[in-house]
Image (cartoon, coloured by chain):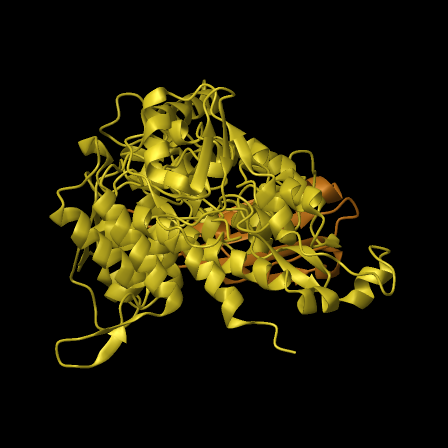
Amino acid sequence: MQFIQPILWQDAIDKIGQKSLIGSALSSEEWSEIPLELRERAFFSSTIENVRFLQRARDGITEFLSSAVETLPDGQKALATGSRQQFIKQMQDFAIAEGMGPLDAHDAGTIKDITSEGRLGLIFDVQTQSAEDYGYWKQGMDPDVLNEFPAQRFIREREVKQPRPIHQQNEGVVRLKSDLEFWLGMNSPAIGGFGVPWGPWGFGSGMGVEDADRDEAEQLGLLKPGDTVQPVDRDFNDKLQASTQGLDQDMVAKLKQAFGDQVVFNDEENMVAWSGKPAGSSAPPSPAPAPAAIPAAPSTPAAPATLDDVLKQLGLDAKANATADDMIALREQLKEQNPVNQAQVIKSIKGDQPAGALTEANIRKNVQEFLDFIPPAKVHHLPTLKISVTKSQDYIGQYSTKGEVQFSHDFLAHDPDRFRKNAFHELAHWLHREGDQAYRDAIRKHFEARTAGEKVVNLKPYAAKGKKDKWYEPYAGKIYHFETTPEGLEIPTRYLEWLTMTPAEQAILWNDPDFRETMKIVLQGLF
Amino acid sequence: MITTTCTLTFKDGTTVAGRVAVETPFDDAHVIYSGHVHRLPRKLAKTSPAVLRVMFRNLARELGAEINITDEGKFDVEE
């Protein structure tokens, strides 16, 4: 039996091409007010009015999915859009040529900037994943496939920072593919989902599905031997209608114009229904709905995680003795789903070495590892990094100001582990000293509270002065000569080194109440 | 270079110690254990002086032992 039939996969490709292009200055929040049934069929991106840009983006993704080829000037054939990176480059060039950019200059390079790699990459990722997931679902609705594999299992494909509780509760659950109530529940807009019975299961959900065969479905009592499961895609389409009540009339007019005869507006009842006709043609009805809207702004995903939420979900909020496995889970949860790429952050690297720990590649690798934990919104407010490798014997690493970091060749060139920990240390300075005032205030207040009444002493075994307290490392209490009010400048540095430690070491520190009290405050910088 | 030695003294007078020597604060090194090592419910084979100190402090609380920590040497360079 052939499970992957080209004609069905073509549906997945077609759904991108059939999306109606809608240029609009609406923000992501405003787009969320548009009926889901229309958003699913629209190719849009928040705050982008340029329809030619949207056309190019839709074409590029369709080309990628269908592996369309173009003839190069030398006569050779090549994929028109052969990779994610190529898509991003093409769209960046196009957007710049069109004079497009962020509405606010402060958003340059951020997810709000359509010329940024992050924004374009997100568009590409969600659209292609949507197509693949729709194609997989569509294949599963083929009667022969459905007979052999009538059910599917809801699985976690990757760990995420804040899993949705309902997803956690249903990990590993097997249900019939026709159980629309269940699958729509897993992708409900109420939990940041897309309202369709296929993936993606919400922004950054990390969830997926895998087929379950008839034997397993029968053992689970989902159906009896000889039962036939009916495909459900047409039923799903038939139910699509939505209210336009509350929509601005200008927007209703724009949607009417953009969707044409794909949708039927009932102005008297403020309702809109899907006609089933493909975009811009009078061809026979297509059953293929488009799955998800383009991600556009960072506010669209599920509610932002807090450290308390993460600890609660992992059961670490009330656990007296955390294990190494707990620390592995926590470290993974602290990672960003779409971290900023180091290339966007590093302005220059000077003095890098041809081999050893201080090669350009290894410097970039360590910066990226640090960035993997930092919310992009925070990173975009930090100065770019100007990194230099020096011959100093006076310091191991050093953070100056405005993103200038020096690493000592003499101390670091031959020890990758030492460099990794020092890189985290110096980049923690960057995050803390150049970051938001609220974080600096929280660290300063913690330093004041913990060291109240203490005298300034020599912090042995360091040649430094400060307040010793119960920091796990005396250097965390250092007070610099230029500080009129102690800021706790070495608290984030020392404590974020924890991210480079082994899980067993992390657990030992985490289980120390004094360490944990400070660490929880330091980790606020990662949210 | 510093050498940090953490020693636990149990109520019966027996002791167990862990020692680690590193060149910089960013280093880990193999821990050398001595004394009644079997009384330690957990050990790290390799770590930093800072983590060794916390581990032994936690163990002291857990096992009802007295703890003594010494540092020899100093770190000369800035970070």
Q: Is residue A163 left or right of residue A263?
A: right
x 25%, y 50%: residue: A344
Q: Is residue A324 left or right of residue A495?
A: right
x and y, in percent, of residue A409 in the image = 23, 62
The image quadrant that residue A227 belongs to is bottom right
Q: Which of the pair B66/A143 is nearer the observer?
A: A143
Q: Which of the pair A202/A235 is nearer the observer?
A: A235
Q: How many labels does the image show?
A: 0
The image quadrant that residue A140 belongs to is bottom right
Location of the C terminus of chain A by quadrant is top left
x and y, in percent, of residue A226 in the image = 85, 65
Q: Which of the pair A17/A452 is nearer the observer?
A: A17
Location of the N terminus of chain A by quadrant is bottom right
Q: Chain A is drawn in which colour?
A: yellow
- Looking at the image, residue A447 lies above or below residue B9: above
**Visible residue check, residue A301:** no
**Visible residue check, residue A279:** yes
x 37%, y 57%: residue: A420
- Looking at the image, residue A457 lies above or below residue A408: above
x and y, in percent, of residue A23 in the image = 28, 38
x and y, in percent, of residue A335 in the image = 47, 47
Q: Which of the pair A77/A279 is nearer the observer?
A: A279
x 69%, y 39%: residue: B61
- Looking at the image, residue A72 lies above or below residue A392: below
Chain in orange? Answer: B
